[in-house]
Image (tube, rainbow, N blue to C red):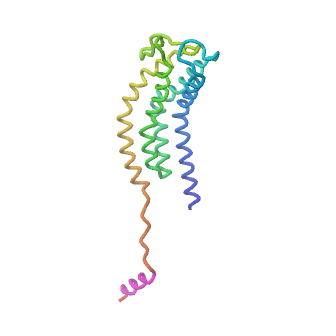
Amino acid sequence: MEDHAARNKRMALTVWGVSVAILLGPSLLVWIVRGAGYAVGCEPGPGLCRGMTLGGGLGDTLALAWSVGTDLLLLIVLTFAAMLAAFFARRPLLGTLSMLLLPILSLLLPMMAVYTAKYDDCPVSADGIGSCFLWGAPMGMSFHTAASAADLIFAITPYSFALAVMLGLVGWFFTRPKPPPAFTPLSAQMRHFGEEDN
């Protein structure tokens, strides 16, 4: 019984980890590229970064992050999968935090990367007006999407918070540890049985 329960818990945590990896993995790739720019001391600008076309890598990872973060159906499905997996693993707090933070972080992390990499002549517009060259590569819509990501965050945050509170309470109710049954000594049981016979 214990082995079966442990296997189910491990499987649920695996589902949680895969869901989180799909939601936040592309954003972490964005920050790896952005961190490389910090590490080699490249200021944001149209020129190459120490002879490297680092902007191409940033644009590609941003496009991947936006394909996950701005697809609301995929965002909702993966967030619910992570939350339910945490509940099945009997971790209601983890499930509640997953519902609360994962949709916001999947949009916030790439948006922050964009705003830390833009410079004066690099437009970021929700209407897609203008073109920005960063570290030798055109950013295209991968930068402009950051302007509309803020609106998406403000739109989904109230719903995410309300669902996290409501489903967190439900999850806590179903996953809270059950108290062990009261132990009745055998002698007391026999005495009670004898009293019934009389």
Residue 16 lies, in percent from the top left, at: 52, 43
Figure disc tally: 0
Q: In which quadrant of the rendered image does the C terminus lie?
A: bottom left
Residue 78 on the magenta span: no
Which quadrant of the figure has residue 14? Answer: top right
Which quadrant of the figure has residue 3? Answer: bottom right
145 to the left or right of 197: right
Residue at position x 44%, y 34% in the image = 103
Residue 193 on the magenta span: yes
Q: Please tell me which residue lies in front, 113 or 126.
A: 113
Residue at position x 40%, y 27% in the image = 152
**Residue furthest out toward the front:** 41
Residue 151 lies, in percent from the top left, at: 38, 25
179 to the left or right of 142: left
Q: Please tell me which residue lies in front, 115 or 108.
A: 115
Q: Would you place residue 160 above or below residue 59 in this image?
A: below
**Residue furthest out toward the bottom:** 198
Q: In which quadrant of the rendered image does the N terminus lie?
A: bottom right
Residue at position x 59%, y 18% in the image = 56
Prevailing secondary structure of the magenta residues: helix
Q: Which residues are magenta?
A: 186-196
Q: Please tell me which residue lies in front, 65 or 5.
A: 65
Q: Would you place residue 29 above or below residue 8 in this image?
A: above
